Image: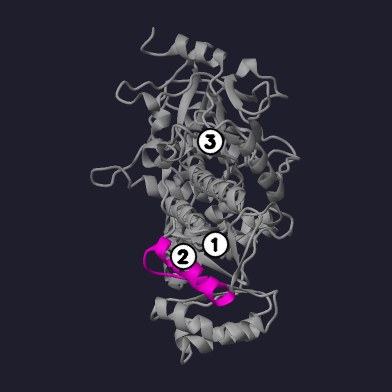
Amino acid sequence: PLATTRPWFPGRGADPRAKTATRRHHPRPQQRRRRWHQQISSSRSRRNGEFRTMALFGGLPMGIMTDSYKAGHFTQYPEAIRASAYGEFRRGYNKDKEDTRVVFYGVRYIVETFLHRKWTKEDVEKVEHFYSHHKAPFNTEYPWPRDLFHSIVDECGGYFPIKLEALPEGTCVNSHVPVFQISAEGKYSGLITFMETLLCQVWYPSTVATLSRRCRQIVEAAFDKSVDEATHFLIPSRLHDFGFRGCTCAEQSVIGGCAHLLNFEGSDTMSAAYYAQFVLNGGKPVASSIPATEHSVMMSWQTEKEAIENMIDIYGEGIFACVMDSYDYAKALGEVLPSVAAKKNAKGPGGLMVLRPDSGDPVEAVLMALEAAEKVFGAETNGKGYKVIKGCGVIQGDGINIDGLRKILEATMAAGYSAENVAFGMGGGLLQKVNRDTMSFATKLSTITLPDGTERIVMKAPKTDVNKTSLPGKLGVKLSEDGTTPMVYPSEKVSEEENLLQVVYDHGPVAGMEWDSFEQVRARVTDMWAKLPPAADAISGEMRQLIDKHHPHRQ
């Protein structure tokens, strides 16, 4: 349940470094330490599967959910009463300078999964045992904020003491626009970037959402060129998520799979489809799929012909897919497909058989399938002069990435076929072959206020890589005058009503806050991506003045 009041926390506090970082101020009786060891031993004695589930999906205390060096940063920051930091994508997808647009998505999952988790005394006891053996060499005690961690439990209601502002889910921005901003106060100022590690993970769903959106842009362009307007309703089904089995874990399949569903409706990643529908969209369906064979199904029959005829018997009046390369792709297209045509056609004009090649050169394999399908089932010419095959199509799901998708569509249209004849399945190319550097995500400190009230506005400016220069000061984001482009300003230049950075966590869950439904987020992506100039300069004039004033190489 959401907290109805903001947990109390001290506006100012004693310097947590006043005493040594390793000194114990909360004595732990030997009995408690023995009890802790007994709990660990008991956990180890459980079945392996049960222990793994406990450890990975609920047993990890929040005090270690960061990088090691961050645990000691509270001793390294100067004494402060306030601090702020922010996160940004520093470039467009794969260093694209002509299109720097980013789809921001995924902060809700991080907030609800991690920031809303209350810390307990038991959690702090667990991390104490861990930190006592974590410093190199010889596994000695690592510096960690023992007193502050206990204060989180005793004084903050168990909630981590920061305020987090973030852009609404699905907001489209150009590079260098802050997507979230962190604030900390009082004795907790030294923990300003402790949650950076988890918050930075917003890079993954945002990168997948951006990649998927760029794929949709390619599909839309192909439809504009070769598909009649009345058939554009097929666009959301043209790129199917095949990535579940290639994910590192089920959690990744949900996070990345939902990001893809912002742009398309096709998905075989049911973990994401379920989560998006029932957790994010009030039970309203978000994704769909079709019955389809795999190689094991095809091989289980005496012949491929029998396997396909079985699919026709069961699903022939609707849409179904058959993989065609179990033995000899060319033979399957040239001999097996004609042998099932009469049975397929007898089911009536409402059926659609989708041919799936799964090996060989992707462009060549798709063209072979299109030519074979046209020869067997015939084709009509649409209003734009491109051929549409009757009752048959192709889905290419092997080795697909954004460049391959573009090449196949170009080759399809060059051969005289409408883009509606072809769909795509993307697995590793969608959910796996991205990383934090794909759009260069980073979080950096931007202000720190000293005990005497002096505010230091700071920015990173490495001469060896000017692309890693960060923004100074407290930040705000508002739309340009024409309403197309989110722009970054000094915070004092942006009113609360204008600011796109909204409070999503404030020393605990925000009372009364409701996240947008998945349907609303989808609509935001569609609207903002279309309006946003591909390579807009999102740094306002006021922000540039602040950069000039505080740039360390221009003093």
Q: Where is residue 100 in the image (x, y as percent from the top left)?
A: 49, 34
| Residue 268 in sight here | yes
Q: What element carries label 3?
A: loop
**If you read the primary sequence from the N terminus, does the residue marked by circle 2 or circle 3 appear first?**
3
Q: State which region is magenta.
A: 354-377
- 200 vs 381, left or right, is left
Callout 2 touching callout 3 (CB < 8 Å): no
Q: Residue 366 carries which label?
A: 2
* Quadrant of the frame with the C terminus: top left
- Displayed quadrant of residue 484: top right
Question: Percent position (x, y) of residue 527?
Answer: 67, 39
- Tell which tag, 1 or 3, sits nearer the viewer: 1
Point 46% across, 58% down: residue: 35
- Label 3: few (<14), some (14–19) or many (≥20) C-alpha neighbours in 10 Å: many
- Position of 517 with respect to 33 (left or right) is right
Report the residue marked by disc 3.
Answer: 101
- Figure check: 20 above or below 38: above
Residue at mark 1: 422
